Image (cartoon, helix red, strand yellow):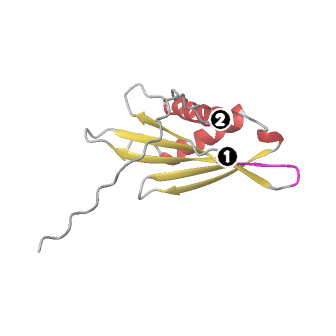
Amino acid sequence: MSIRLSSFLANIASACQCDEPAPNGGTWDISRTLNYRLGLARLVLGSRGANAAVQPMGSILLQAFTLADGSPCVKANLSWSDQAAAATRAVYAKPSTNWESEARLVAAEWLAGPREAKLEALPAAAPEAVEIPEPLAAAV
């Protein structure tokens, strides 16, 4: 694989620290977990305040795998502590792929927060009485 999962994870963490030096007025509290055998990595991000309490902010889960054509791919699942929303971003390896800039894009998307769901308001259906047919009696 042309991408080292630990390097990609470290690049995301450093991009978060560079783009937001003092999250919520505190310092970053970052925890990394890697499983090389399964191709999984997790970055748990939080903010440590002046009273040393850690406020969780969210996480980034990475999954590295090989596509059917043999090219590597990394899928990033972004989640935030205070939101039920999550986002997914895939990075496909091409000859022109710059993994450091892709890591910065993943970090920037996570720092921007979840996208607003823009759903059109659907007209509410009028409540109607619905008849439920009785089950047929067993034939004797």
- In what element is the residue under mark 1? loop
In the image, residue 105 sits, relative to residue 137, either above or below, namely above
- The residue closer to the viewer here, 136 or 90, is 136
Residue 6 placed where, x, y %? 53, 48
Q: Position of residue 55 (x, y in %)?
A: 75, 51
**Residue lying at 63% horizontally and 35% vertically, measured from the top left:** 113
To which residue does mark 2 refer?
Answer: 111
The magenta segment is 46-51
Classify residue 4 as left or right of residue 95.
right
Q: Secondary structure at mark 2?
A: helix
Q: How many marks?
A: 2
Distance CA(mark 1)–CA(mark 2): 13 Å
Q: Which residue is mark 1?
A: 82
Which is closer to the viewer, label 1 or label 2? 1
**Mark 2 or mark 1, which is nearer the start of the sequence?**
1
Name the foreground residue: 117 vs 52.
117
Q: Amino acid at mark 1?
A: Asp
